[in-house]
Amino acid sequence: MADLDSVLAYTANLMSDIDKKLMIVLKDGRTLIGFLRSVDQFANLVLQDTIERIHVGKQYGDIPRGLFVIRGDNVAILGEMDDKKDLTQLQKVSIEDILDAQREQLQRRDEETKLRNQAMLERGLQPHGDVGSEDTL
């Protein structure tokens, strides 16, 4: 019963954030920014005027997403935004530029993972992730 009480207390706290601009980091790593319009007993959220913010190095880009529904169990971090206190030292770039940079970053990570997995296999160690998958080689 203590778990239910903590969930209800968390949801009740979210009610005070209705109509405020929030930044939400999802468990899959995506960052969303929008105005909280609704919350239910499961901490499911409805954001309006939502953007997805993508960070790569010291650059970022915003992709408009509009109305966005988020399941409560997908939220990793949630906090109120204060546009007056923009302390970031990031450079805003176009959507195309940030998506290209993100694609390049993911390709570099994939290449590094393949090299690391290959080195582990050569040493007789089992790589992490999809064991035995040809993608790891």
Image (cartoon, grey):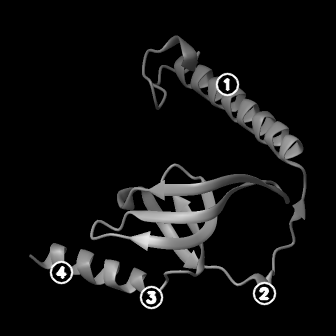
Q: Quadrant of residue 41?
A: bottom left
Eye-nearest disc, 3 or 4: 3
Q: Which residue is mark 3?
A: 16
Label 2: how many Cα within 10 Å (few below 14, some 14–19, many 20+): few
For the point 53% across and 19% down, the residue is 121
Q: Position of residue 45 (x, y in %)?
A: 44, 65
Q: Residue furthest left?
A: 1
For the point 8% across and 76% down, the residue is 1
Q: Nearer the viewer, residue 34 or 82?
A: 34
Q: Position of residue 12 (x, y in %)?
A: 32, 84
**Residue 90, numbered circle:** none
Label 4: how many Cα within 10 Å (few below 14, some 14–19, many 20+): few
Q: Earlier in the sequence, mark 4 or mark 2?
A: 4
Marks 3 and 4, how far apart at CA: 18 Å
Q: Nearer the viewer, residue 92 or 124?
A: 92
Q: Which residue is mark 2?
A: 85
Q: Is there CB contact under 8 Å for labels 2 and 1? A: no
Q: Earlier in the sequence, mark 2 or mark 3?
A: 3
Q: Is there CB contact under 8 Å for labels 4 and 2? A: no
Marks 4 and 2, how far apart at CA: 34 Å
Q: Position of residue 59 (x, y in %)?
A: 85, 57
Marks 3 and 1, how far apart at CA: 49 Å
Secondary element under disc 1, as helix, strand or loop, is helix
Secondary element under disc 2, as helix, strand or loop, is helix
Q: Which residue is mark 4?
A: 5
Q: Nearer the viewer, residue 37 or 78?
A: 37
Q: Amino acid at mark 3?
A: Ser
